[in-house]
Amino acid sequence: MNEYETKMIEAFVNKPDKPEKGFWYVNSFEKYNINGIDSMKWNWSWWAFFGGLLFLLYRKSYAAAGALFLISLVLGLIPFAGLIVSILAGGYSSYFVYKTYKKKKLAIEAMYSDEDQRIAAMRVSGGYNTWVLWILPALFILGIVAAVAIPQLASMKESAIQAQEAYELSTQQYENEQVQ
């Protein structure tokens, strides 16, 4: 990969304080383009495995995130399908990030002829969505609240049903005593 391409990928990743991130994406993207031909290859990402949809949203791959969401909805009804979807997301999501990069790169190169302008434009166009980082802890907290609240609500509902049944039984017994 030439120096310009490396700079464009690093600008797309937009993590100047973490050069290892740019390096990871440069290595990943090299796998997807062999002799000018793009092909989908397996490239593992733990972030994509655990984050799935959120990983793709974080990297601004909205179409792929929408597709993964729909696939997850449909396959979520099948036992263990969620695990399979997570494994596939972990192996293939970075390819869809690569496709997002390529699309943005082509658009930027059509607009700008100067290399520095292209890199600056990629830094703005690429990057990541920080709001996704706020969703992760919010979902985690929501999951904990749901794990605690749902059993409590079920217990309260069961207690209310038992109380209603006891009330109806005592009312019926009282009415039977009045008739006698």
Image (cartoon, rainbow, N blue to C red):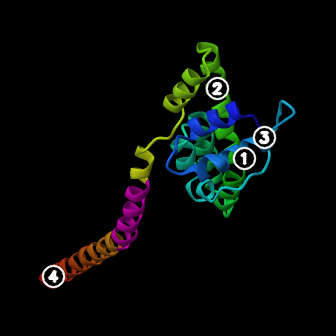
- Which mark sits nearer the N-terminus, 2 or 1? 1
Disc 3 versus disc 1: distance between alpha carbons? Answer: 7 Å
In the rendered image, the vertical position of residue 120 relative to residue 136, given as above or below: above
Nearer to us in this view, 166 or 41: 41
- Residue 32 bears which disc, if any? 3
Image x and y of residue 35, in percent: 87, 33
Around disc 2, counting alpha carbons within 10 Å, would you say few (fewer than 14), some (14 to 19), or many (20 or more)? Answer: many
Measured from the top left, where is residue 171 in percent x and y? 18, 77
Residue at mark 3 to residue at mark 2: CA–CA distance: 15 Å
Label whose residue precedes the other's in the sequence (4 or 1): 1
* Magenta stretch, residue numbers: 136-151
Whether residue 61 can be seen here: no
Contact, mark 3 vs mark 1 (Cβ under 8 Å): yes
Q: Amino acid at mark 4?
A: Tyr
- Which image quarter holds the C terminus? bottom left
Query: Which residue does the numbered mark 2 point to in the structure image?
Result: 105
Residue 23, given in percent of the width and then of the height, sits at: 65, 48
83 left or right, relative to 17: right
Crowd tier of the residue under label 1, counting other residues whose Cα lies within 10 Å: few below 14, some 14–19, many 20 or above = some
Label disc, if present, on residue 174 of the rendered structure: 4
